[in-house]
Image (cartoon, rainbow, N blue to C red):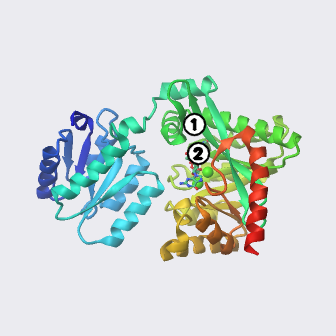
Amino acid sequence: MPKKFAIRILVLDDEPFMLKLLARMLANLGYTSVSTFDSGRAALEQVDDPERSPDLILLDLIMPEMDGVEFARRLVEHRYAGALILVSGEDERMRQSVEKLVRAHKIPVLGHLHKPASPEGLAALLEKWTASTQDGHRAAKKIYAADEVRAAIVNGELVNYYQPKVSVVTGEVVGAESLVRWRHPQDGMVFPDQFIGVAEAHGLIDDLTRAVLDGALAQIRRWEEAGLMLRVAVNVSMDNLTLLDFADFVAAQTAAAGVSPHSVVLEVTESRLMQDTRAALEILTRLRMKRFKLSIDDFGTGNSSLAQLRDIPFDELKIDQSFVHGAWANDTLRALFDSSLGLARQLGMETVAEGVEDQADWDFVRKSGCDLAQGYFIAKPMPAADLPGWIQTWKTRMREYLSAGE
Ligand code: C2E
Ligand code: CA
Ligand code: CA
């Protein structure tokens, strides 16, 4: 019971009565650090305050000034690191769209509380959450301070893992995406969602990207020397696309490593709104002119996808995993998947389905006409040294799969 006191909960609802009711229910359940807000604007100020940022938000979806959908989008922009409970009346579609939006951005949704909210319903959701995170969200998912991240970069504690991208038709391994990990001396393996946002917010993302890119380039070279020709993707943050010399920098590093730009894919996430579109546009266009491959990542989760496709000459489109995993059993997902695919084809882009997690996803993707696939079903991200061995196992798996299917 005492641990509950440490959990900070924020309740956002435009009805004063609901605020009082929910605050009372929470107090009765032993949660004492509860703040209530009737407007999204004020609630966001608390989210931004590192001393008071909540671990959990109870969010009313229908509000006059800033509604729940907009608030959820703002949470993503403000890099909210906690969880959400959605509170609403009847509107199932609205709830589903908010849930999809925030899940795509990895904000955990504990569930949905129907109005009028019952203490039992609320208790059940909270129970599930505290059980799964023991000390609550903060302890389960520590976000590191800027100085720690800076030191990690300087001390070379970041390592690249690689996740294969394979042809869905032939099974051939055509490339790999580099995904950064932090080998933390005390905490063990730390995942990017615990430090990329910090790096972006504190001007460290250029150094981080540089470290990842250098590692990836050296690795491409090593694989090439061993006869393994792979296109390796590096994730580029929108914050890398503000300094105009980024394109020259990438080109210089690539040349110095003795690697062809054709072997380098730059994956850009479209989900964050660009502040200075012109700089990003210019940098990406220049990279493309230097023959680097450009990939639009997490396609379908942002608002500016179409505008970006219009403005930037992408070579590859990655359909976000939230439209891939389970699409075989869900008409809405399949429609979104198919339309992304159609769009990419018309624009002459190669397509990658992300989040191919199980056999059913793989069977679906194989029938879909998508070019490449990536996901746990094929392989989890792995250390570079494991890749050649994995390719051998995969070849055997594919041979068996193809002979069983035909
Ligand atoms: P992303 O670029 O969309 O990368 C795919 C993420 O999905 C990876 O998580 C990967 O491990 C995970 N994934 C792969 N297959 C599956 C699957 O079948 N099911 C599910 N549920 N997940 C799958 P990871 O490595 O934790 O990276 C998270 C995000 O962090 C990346 O998303 C990317 O946006 C960012 N990131 C990673 N490395 C870098 C980097 O070097 N620089 C920058 N700026 N961002 C990075
Ligand atoms: Ca990516
Ligand atoms: Ca992605």
Which residue: 55% across, 60% down? 321
Q: Which residue is identified by label 1?
A: 205
Alpha carbon of mark 2 to alpha carbon of mark 1: how far?
8 Å
Q: Residues within 10 Å of mark 1 (few under 14, many from 20)?
A: many
Q: Give the position of the N terminus as an image quadrant.
A: top left
Query: Which of 303/345 is in front?
Result: 345
* Residue 237 image label: 2
In the image, is residue 203 above or below residue 38?
Answer: above
Report the side of 36 relative to 389 (left or right): left
Q: Residue at x 51, y 71 (%)?
A: 333
Mark 2 packing: few (<14 Cα in 10 Å), some, or many (20+)? many
Whether label 2 lies within 8 Å of ligand 1 gets the answer: yes
Say what secondary structure mark 1 lies in: helix
SS at circle 2: loop
Q: How many marks?
A: 2
User: Image check: 276 left or right of 295?
Assistant: left
* Residue drawn at x 78%, y 70% as measured from the top left: 403
Residue 402 appears in the figure = yes
Q: Nearer the viewer, residue 33 or 128?
A: 128
Across and down, in percent, residue 171 comes to: 76, 62
Name the disc covering residue 243, or none. Answer: none
**Rendered position, 83 above or below 135:** below
Image marks 2 and 1: residues in contact by CB distance under 8 Å? yes
Amino acid under disc 2: Ser
The quadrant holding residue 320 is bottom right
Q: Position of residue 352 (x, y in %)?
A: 66, 62
Dot 1 amino acid type: Ile
The answer to whether the beta carbon of the residue marked 1 is less than 8 Å from any atom of ligand 1 is yes
Horizontal side of residue 41 vs 270, given as left or right:
left
